[in-house]
Amino acid sequence: MPKPARKPYRRGTPEEIAARVSVIRDGLIAGKGCGQIAEELGVAVTRVYDAINADPSLKDAKKLPSVGPLAQRAGVAVGALAPALRSNGRSFVEWLIAQTPEGGTMAEVAVACAFDAYQDDLDVAAATQTSPERGK
């Protein structure tokens, strides 16, 4: 039985390649498998593997623990930043934009703020010999 014909693959412009790499990185961070990412991009799975092997930052992203399953086990959702930002009003969004360095993302700043709060909770817990609790 002959093999099915391969889809033609066009390398793409630098912008298209950067967009694909971004989709792959986001997918890996979200805990998606290479097959699922390839399906979303409409490319062969080997193209996703090739991209991961060619880009050290994608290799690092693949090593990160998946956030989705961790959140699901805790009974919470990962969610999306944009709708959450809109629900907090324009002045908050403008403040967050002002805090975001050029070339950075608002998500990175929001996570950094959350991480600072987490570190504060750890400091309080260490000072009081207690364990930090979720949502307190």
Image (cartoon, rainbow, N blue to C red):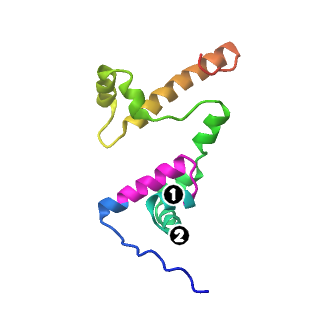
Tag 2, which secondary structure? helix
Q: Position of residue 112 (x, y in %)?
A: 46, 31
Q: Which mark is residue 37?
A: 1
Q: How many marks?
A: 2
For the residue marked with disc 2, what is the amino acid? Thr
Task: Identify the residue under disc 2.
Answer: 46
* Residue at x 30%, y 59% (from the top left corner): 15
Residue 109 visible? The answer is: no
Q: Which residues are magenta?
A: 18-34
Most frequent secondary structure within the magenta stretch: helix
Quarter of the rendering occupied by the N terminus: bottom right
Spot occupied by residue 95 in the image (x, y as percentages of width and height): 31, 24
Residue in view at x 67 percent, y 13 percent: 128
Q: Is residue 29 magenta?
A: yes
**Residue 13 sits in quarter:** bottom left
Is residue 109 rendered to the left or right of residue 122? left
Horizontally, residue 73 falls left or right of residue 62, namely right
Q: Amino acid at mark 1?
A: Ile
In 3D space, how far apart are the residues under numbered discs 2 and 1 (Cα atoms)? 11 Å
Helix, strand or loop for disc 1:
helix
